[in-house]
Amino acid sequence: MKEIIIIILISYLLGNFQTSYILGRVFKKTDIRKFGSGNAGTTNALRVFGKKIAIATLLIDALKGVAAVMIGREISGDIGAITAGVSVVIGHNWPVFLKFKGGKGIATTIGVGLTITFLSGIISIILGILIVIKTKYVSLGSLLAVIIWPVITIIVYKPFNLSLLILTTLLAIMALYKHRSNIRRLLSGQESKLGNKLN
């Protein structure tokens, strides 16, 4: 139990590192949460700061997920890896140091997914990218990718692995919750497309 608590704390605190917020403060003297969509994530970083900071945000946020899982696995095997994966995304989405106002967790979820469930993760990511290319809606591609991820995990990983299903389902639920405003805008036809500037 002590090991699991340590994993949760390390992973949560690692998730608290808000890349777009920190890069925005350092290089642009700007709090990204006050501009664009108000989200401290890759898509809003692209709109507010441009490609360089957006790419850095995507890579570093994904690497947080990778690092947390590797630390968790080193400490307590597969259970540690799964615990770390959930905890780092919680830390990213609800960081205590920024009054629990973080990002939506997609990049960090990608890092977790590729480290623990590489095959189903890469299939889901490819499907999500294709949806974004087709529709220009980043939120739609992200949402459909995380929704299909648990299903693909069940299909490709034999024998059935309940721990992986729980992991992918929990991360999908968190992503859906954090994207609830995007879902409302998608349904009403008001969601901004990739490349559009937000006022």
Image (spheres, rainbow, N blue to C red):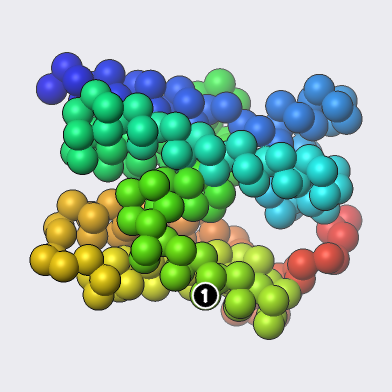
- Above or below 79: residue 23: above
Camera-nearest residue between 56 and 199: 56
Quadrant in the rendering for residue 121: bottom left
Q: Mark 1 falls on what kind of element?
A: helix
Residue 154 image position (x, y, % from top left): 23, 70
Q: Is residue 50 left or right of residue 56?
A: right
127 to 61, vertically: above or below: below
Q: Quadrant of the C terminus?
A: bottom right
Residue 136 or residue 124, whichever sits in front: 124
Residue 39 shows in the view: no
Residue under label 1, please give it.
127
Q: Residues within 10 Å of mark 1 (few under 14, many from 20)?
A: some
Q: Residue at x 64, y 46 (%)?
A: 58
Tell me residue 124's x, y (percent). Answer: 45, 68
Q: Is residue 21 visible?
A: yes
Closer to us: 16 or 154: 154
Give the residue type that dot 1 points to: Leu
Q: Which corner quadrant holds the N terminus?
A: top left
